[in-house]
Image (spheres, helix red, strand yellow):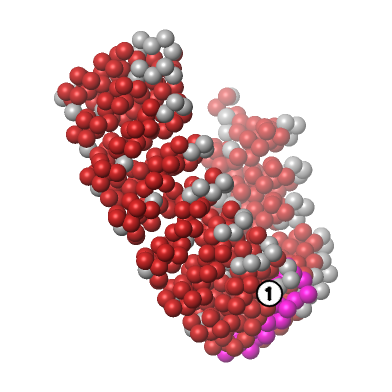
């Protein structure tokens, strides 16, 4: 009897749990759908499980979202692609619920299933589903339908294709702005499946209606459609249909629409080609760079380098550079920050002379900006300028500013400078580095902020790798080891950290002669934190040093630390001793 009832058991549990008041049990049950489907077998999944899910009227969005996600990968459990259509009814129901994320997930799952369905199943099951949703009384169904047309259209016969194009046109003129927004969002995907003759006439007519919509939220989504449609049209059609729309949008009364144009302008330029860009889009871009709204200027400033790459250097200097000068002293710090993050990329576009004459003063003013993010963004891109103007000029003009920033009151700015030092060092060369920047690198080891001290130790390791152990032996090691006697234990800990990083770069001999004695001496420190850090450093040195040094020097020190009164010191010392044993075992 138990054997007969067993196949019913999973579905019984599922039904019980799906009706349970505890949401967590209902969620767990939904997330185990694939396991339950395997237990039931393909036929019973189709005949019992899927109808049950279609009728399930759970009102919790989290459960519905999990169900929409699970059903998207359910084709193998219902018997493969030929039975995929049985998954459509529960997902169709989910496409009509009020919660947006549930509907979006249901649409995503339907698209995934539709992409695998056979052509005749699409015509028989999927296209009617799209039509039903598009004609739905409640706006949620109509919103969901917009995301399914591109799947339904490709396999439909001609008479159905005409009907689908007509329905999409109606959705673009729907009374509800939410539906028109969804139609505008998905227009590019739908247009990509439409034949070129219909694209020019019907789709462009739909698009023009959307660009003149009275809701700015619809118009700004139509801006994204500009770039998508531009890629599908021939260049001459693009200039005729898309270009005037972009120019109008750049003067739209809503700042959100202008913001979208500023954000998408580079993609739009690619779509319309270089000639129209120069004639029509440069004035539009200049308008956006001088917009009243800071958000629009931020978006436009962030694209300045990309836009200049499309233009000739003369056009960029003539039209864009005056705007860049204005933006560098913009009243909004966020505009200046956006400009600082990309302005360095203009140097290769404008060439050496224009960079020296026009851009360098702007870089220097941004490097001295009161807002730390602006300074940060300039520092992180300095290498792009160096490639254009050469190291001599860079060092004369920008280095004093860099030295000033190395002592900036905002620690994140100091951190950015430290991270840039190895790159600067490789470009400046060893002689120049020793004169100007060597002292700074040591100074950071005694910074008040831990992140700076930590980065400074890593910086010394990278410099040793860049200039070699001999240089490090002369310029880094003596100064680092001098600082081990600092009265503050946190600074002594930084030196120990620096030693552990430098040892693998310096090699076994120098480590034994110079670094190891300092570490061993620190094991007698009065602060337990120093002592257990000594144990950690000794553990890290074991692989670098030979067996005789480990046995003769490191192990006795660790044995002594393992008997320390402090529990943490004993713990780390015993860990290090275990590491010694493991390293010595093979030999």
142 or 80: nearer the viewer: 142
- Total marks in image: 1
Q: Is disc 1 placed on a helix, strand or loop?
A: loop
Look at the image and tell me in which quarter the C terminus lies. top left
Task: Tell me the crowding category of disc 1: few under 14, some 14 to 19, or many 20 or more residues within 10 angstroms, Cα based.
Answer: some
Q: Is residue 413 visible?
A: yes
560 or 84: nearer the viewer: 560
Q: Which residues are magenta?
A: 230-258
Residue at 51% in and 47% down = 407
Please name the residue that numbered disc 1 is placed on: 290
Chief secondary structure of the magenta portion:
helix
Q: Where is residue 397, by image quadrant?
A: bottom left
Q: Is residue 493 visible?
A: no
Q: Indicate whether residue 249 is drawn in magenta.
A: yes
Residue at 75% in and 60% down = 141
In the rendered view, tell whether residue 352 sits above or below residue 366. below
In the rendered view, tell whether residue 430 sits above or below residue 439. below
Look at the image and tell me in which quarter the N terminus lies. top right
Residue 135 x/y as whole percent: 78, 66
Residue at 75% in and 32% down = 21
Residue 528 x/y as whole percent: 43, 18
Q: Is residue 91 shown left or right of residue 545?
A: right
Residue at 38% in and 27% down = 485
Q: Is residue 58 shown left or right of residue 559?
A: right
5 or 544: nearer the viewer: 544
Residue 69 x/y as whole percent: 61, 49
Q: Indicate whether residue 551 is drawn in magenta.
A: no
201 or 505: nearer the viewer: 505
């Amino acid at each position: 009897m138990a054997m007969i009832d067993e196949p019913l058991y999973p579905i019984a549990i599922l039904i019980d749990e799906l009706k349970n008041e505890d949401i967590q049990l209902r969620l767990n049950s939904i997330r185990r759908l694939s396991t339950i489907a395997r237990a039931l077998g393909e036929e019973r999944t189709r005949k019992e499980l899927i109808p049950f899910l279609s009728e399930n009227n759970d009102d919790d969005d989290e459960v519905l979202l999990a169900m929409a996600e699970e059903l998207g990968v359910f084709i193998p459990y219902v018997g493969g692609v030929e039975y995929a259509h049985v998954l459509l009814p529960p997902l169709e129901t989910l496409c009509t619920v009020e919660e947006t994320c549930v509907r979006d997930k249901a649409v995503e799952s339907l698209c995934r299933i539709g992409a695998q369905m056979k052509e005749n199943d699409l015509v028989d099951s999927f296209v009617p589903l799209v039509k039903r949703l598009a004609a739905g009384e409640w706006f949620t169904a109509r919103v969901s339908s917009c995301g399914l047309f591109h799947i339904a259209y490709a396999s439909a016969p001609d008479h159905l294709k005409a009907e689908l194009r007509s329905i999409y046109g109606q959705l673009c003129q729907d009374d509800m702005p939410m539906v028109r927004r969804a139609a505008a969002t998905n227009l590019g995907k739908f247009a990509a499946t439409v034949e070129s003759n219909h694209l020019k006439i019907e789709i462009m007519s739909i698009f023009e209606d959307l660009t003149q919509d009275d809701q700015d939220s619809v118009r700004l989504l139509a801006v994204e459609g500009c770039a998508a449609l531009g890629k599908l049209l021939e260049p001459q059609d693009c200039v005729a249909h898309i270009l005037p729309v972009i120019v109008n949008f750049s003067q739209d009364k809503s700042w959100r629409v202008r913001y979208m144009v500023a954000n998408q302008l580079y993609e739009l330029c690619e779509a319309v080609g270089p000639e129209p860009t120069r004639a029509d889009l440069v004035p539009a871009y200049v308008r956006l760079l001088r917009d009243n709204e800071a958000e629009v200027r931020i978006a436009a400033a962030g694209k300045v380098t990309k836009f200049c790459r499309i233009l000739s250097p003369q056009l960029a200097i003539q039209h864009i550079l005056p705007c860049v000068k204005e933006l560098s002293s913009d009243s909004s710090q966020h505009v200046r920050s956006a400009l600082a993050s990309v302005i360095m990329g203009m140097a290769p576009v404008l060439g050496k002379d224009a960079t020296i004459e026009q851009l360098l003063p702007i870089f220097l003013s941004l490097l001295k900006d009161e807002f730390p993010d602006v300074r940060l963004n300039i520092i992180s891109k300095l290498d792009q300028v160096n490639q254009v103007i050469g190291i001599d000029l860079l060092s004369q003009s920008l280095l004093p500013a860099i030295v000033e920033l190395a002592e900036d009151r905002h620690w994140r700015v100091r951190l950015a400078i430290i991270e840039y030092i190895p790159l600067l060092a490789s470009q400046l060369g060893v002689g120049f580095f020793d004169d100007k920047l060597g002292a700074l690198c040591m100074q950071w080891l005694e910074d008040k902020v831990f992140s700076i001290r930590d980065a400074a130790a890593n910086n010394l390791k990278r410099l040793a790798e860049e200039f070699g152990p001999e240089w490090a032996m002369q310029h880094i090691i003596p100064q680092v080891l001098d600082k081990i006697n600092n009265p503050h234990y946190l600074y002594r800990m930084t030196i120990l950290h620096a030693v552990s990083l430098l040892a693998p770069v310096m090699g076994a001999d120098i480590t034994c002669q110079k670094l190891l004695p300092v570490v061993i001496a620190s094991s007698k420190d009065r602060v337990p934190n120093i002592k257990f850090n000594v144990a950690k450093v000794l553990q890290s040195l074991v692989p670098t040093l030979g067996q005789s040094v480990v046995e003769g020097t490191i192990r006795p020190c660790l044995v002594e630390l393992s008997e320390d009164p402090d529990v943490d010191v004993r713990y780390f010392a015993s860990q290090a001793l275990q590491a010694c044993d493991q390293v010595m075992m093979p030999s």
